[in-house]
Amino acid sequence: MRRLLFLLVLGTAIWSGYWFIGSSALRQGAEQWFADQSARGITAEKTALAVRGFPNRFDLTVEGLRLIDPQTGMGWEAPFAQIFAMTWKPWHIIAALPPEQTVRLPDQEIAITSDGLLASLRARPATDLPLAAVVVESGAIRAMSSQGWTAAVEKVVASVRAVDGQASAYDLALDVAGLAPDPAQMARLTAETDLPGTVSVIHLLARATLTAPLDRHAGESQPQIAALDLTEALVTWGQLSISAKGGIAPDAEGFAAGRIDIDVTNWDRLVQVLVASGAIKPELAPTVQNMLAALANEGGDPSVLKLPLVFAGGRMSLGPLPLGPAPMLMTPTG
């Protein structure tokens, strides 16, 4: 019995020591991060910083956050932010953000309210700490700009997950429900259509293969996109539906090269939206409408417009329409 009691006391002492050492390192690391930002000229302020959670968790709470880059005018303010980790798996971190926060841009301030905005970051338990998964999710989010516009979503979930057996490949996913852009802007776009003021579904599945894994060495290896495969993409806006799939990869010059096939169901509504947005002039609408109708008829179903988004030779085009330079995916090494 005494031996058992001794082992229990010893185990408790070791575990308590582990927690206090870990919590001290976490606190010092957080304080050092704020000091490093200040040394770089960033306004990095807080009113309180504490680590709690003994004995099973490391709970870091920072209050009165104010981060501003004076050179760019970009910044973020929040009453608090929290980071949680279980003591037996510190490589799995959960961050909770407050229901109200402010994002500063050079020309405006955006007040953001959210319902349960959480982020989860999980690494694999290895010395390089390779990324296993990042998940960001929230219930209703509303943004209000000092310039007068508003936007909202009912729910959003975004994730990046490492692909088993492939050190530098990651599955990307995005699901947005009930996207409601600024009502005044949407009213202008939908005035001549039967489209609602809310985009009901945005869904994306893709796989990105990088030149190096996302781990603690990523700052040195600087991973770039070696290939991007769009497995599935869908946008549903009333009767208008846009789906896409395909793939791109950098060419010898680093520009995107490849093809993404796009299907637009009930595409005729799209022309009216393009006119209302100013993308095409009203007098050109009949010409564009006739051209797209001819392309849709070639596909067999006149209600579905099939267009390839082609990246080649440093340029990109949507069907017969040139769009300009292709995006740069990889910095040339030559």
Image (tube, rainbow, N blue to C red):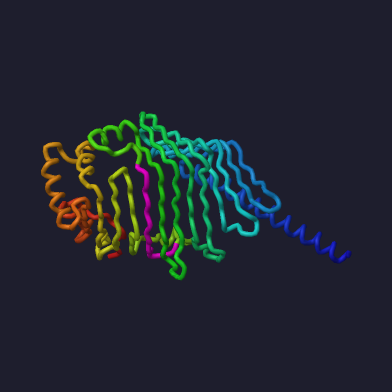
Residue 76 position within the rendered picture, expressed as x and y whole percent measured from the top left: 46, 38
Residue 146 position within the rendered picture, expressed as x and y whole percent measured from the top left: 39, 29
The correct choice, above or below, for 90 with respect to 101 in the image is below
Judged left or right of residue 313, residue 168 is right
Residue range highlighted in magenta: 199-213
The correct choice, above or below, for 51 with respect to 131 in the image is above
Question: Who's the residue at 20% across and 45% down the image?
Answer: 268
Residue located farthest toward the bottom when viewing the structure as drawn? 165
Question: Who's the residue at 15% across and 57% down the image?
Answer: 298
Q: Quadrant of residue 261?
A: bottom left
Judged left or right of residue 237, residue 291 is left
Magenta-drawn stretch contains 175 = no
Question: Who's the residue at 46% across and 44% down the image?
Answer: 40
Q: Quadrant of residue 269?
A: top left
The one of 305 and 277 positioned closer to us in this rendering: 305
* Residue 255 visible in the shown view: no
For the N terminus, the quadrant is: bottom right
What secondary structure is the magenta-colored segment mainly?
strand
Residue 112 position within the rendered picture, expressed as x and y whole percent measured from the top left: 45, 36
Residue 32 position within the rendered picture, expressed as x and y whole percent measured from the top left: 56, 48
The correct choice, above or below, for 148 with respect to 264 in the image is above
Question: Who's the residue at 34% across and 32% down the image?
Answer: 183
Judged left or right of residue 60, residue 196 is left
